[in-house]
Image: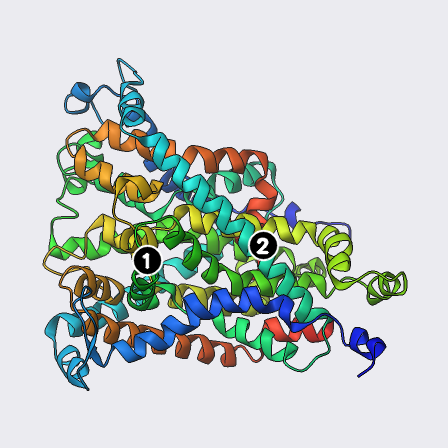
Amino acid sequence: MSRRVGAAAPNVVGALAGWLWLAVIIVPIYYIVVTSLRPQADYFAENTLSWPSHPTLDAYAEVLANDFLRYLTNSVVVTAVSVAVVLAVSLMAAYVVVRSRRRGAARLFQVFLLGIAIPIQATIVPVYYLIVQLGLYDTLWALILPSTAFAVPLSVLILTTFLRDVPRELFESMRVDGAGEWRTLWSLALPLTRPAVVTVGVYDALQVWNGFLFPLVLTQSADTRVLPLSLWEFQGEFSLNVPAVLAAVVLSVLPVLAAYVVGRRQLVSGLTAGFGR
Amino acid sequence: MTVASGRAAGPSLWMAAPALGLFGLFAAVPLLGVLVLSFMRWDGLGDPVWAGADNWGRTLTDPVTLNAMRLTVVVTVVSWLFQAPVSLLLGVFMAGRQRYRAVLSVLYFLPLLFSAAAVAIAFRALLDPNFGLGAALGAPLLAQDWIGSPDLALWVVLFVVGWCFVPFHSLLYQSGVRQIPASLYEAALLDGAGRVQQFFHITVPQLRYTIVTSSTLMIVGSLTYFDLIFVLTGGGPANATRILPLDMYLAGFRSYDMGRASVVAVILVVVGLGVSLALNRLSGANRMESRTEGA
């Protein structure tokens, strides 16, 4: 039999559902884009879904004039520092879980396994107390530290799974050559698990970048405001200027979209990391 | 202990200390803290004072919290009933190798790039009764006061939540379907099984682990929907969309009643952990562990 499964009669129902869902996805996104290009005056006059008769970038200019770049910078700093810290400490922990035969190494793994089941939101009151007590309230550290802590368990689990696939002989030969643990970690474990490190990094970056609850509760001033929170503030400020609010939405998505275009594969595997298979 | 045996034991546990320390201080300690705070009175500014079981009695008889529990159950069940079949069907569709399906899969992914705040803001504008979708299409049926009406707001929330999360779950199903051996379908074809029979007798049973994983994430996820609903409706109108995570935030950071907020938080943790463990047991084995044993 050389007949392939795909050669059967076309799946009409599946295709219909597929195109219908495409409409569900695309209409809101199209709406966001066209509205952000519409002059504010026309928003109340023209058909919402029509192409703007006088397309303009005024809304974008207005958003950029309202400190958008500062919020962007805050988001970049918080995301970059958090991801760098998570990757460093998680790779070290995963290395211990896989390579150590000391007592407690297996227990360590179970602690992190339990950690992925904690709903973040539920700990927000004590986290707030802790951050206030540490004198970190309304600083970028107030966002970086808890975001890092909550990304650690899943990151350790995924890195552990990958590190286990590294042949034991490679570690042994490093040891015979007299390499210490740090050198083995840096010049063997890191290069061999690089795809996993990228995947975990992308996943964590997206979580931190889009995070809303920590910024909402743990920061207050415009100096520490990150993008998702700034969108919410814009919405309150420009309640009648819908094009400007949606222009801010577009601007906040652009960096992620750029990442998606460049590294779609890593992003997709990053998002399904640990859950797929 | 000699140096040699010390080295044979592998890296020192100290290498794991930074990860453990961060996780302990900002995740594990707060988890215990929330239990302690549920027995204390605190307005968020001064020092917490011991209050005994007072918060628990108050919260568990508070009609707002009881309503929030009911809404949480409704949201969990209905969003599963909506998202699970749609994700499964889309995942099967996306797993096809046709060129146009690959293109559609790229587009399906787009909602995952938006933050929940961005999605909520966009839908608020889109569902505006005067200037939104209904007005654009000239369809009075679509021009309702979706977010302002207590009867409709919950359905809007369920739809928008689906819009955000279906892409993720269909990705899980897509990769699950692609791992089903083609020989199973070839054998079914020889036996004369139609497409529908193949779907129910091969695809669905083969996907059982994916179904359990995806359902666990959906159900536990329902307990944590916060940002999307907070920006979309703020829990209103008239508490019509105030599910437990919103009840916790509003009690704690709007009414400055951290004790009550902590009680709700403890409930969320217990239910979340319980559901995870139960579904995990149901699936037969802890997949994360079984995979590591094979290595």
In which chain is the residue bearing label 2?
Answer: A
Say which quadrant the C terminus of chain A sits in.
Answer: bottom right
* Quadrant in which residue A65 is drawn: top left
In this view of the protein, which residue sits in the foreground, B87 or A275?
Answer: A275
For the point 28% across and 27% down, which residue is it? A63
Callout 1 secondary element: loop
* Residue B244 at least partly seen: yes
Left or right of A128, for residue A264: right
Which of pointers 2 and 1 indicates the residue nearer the eye?
1
Mark 1, other Cα within 10 Å: few <14 / some 14–19 / many ≥20: few
* Residue A12 at least partly seen: no
Report the residue that reaches farthest toward the bottom.
Answer: B52
Residue highlighted by disc 2: A87
Q: Give the amino acid type for the residue marked by disc 1 in the picture.
A: Gly
Task: In the rendered structure, find residue B73 and report the number of the disc placed on it.
Answer: none
Residue highlighted by disc 1: A135
- Residue B91 locus on image (x, y percent): 52, 53
For the point 58% across and 59% down, which residue is it? A89
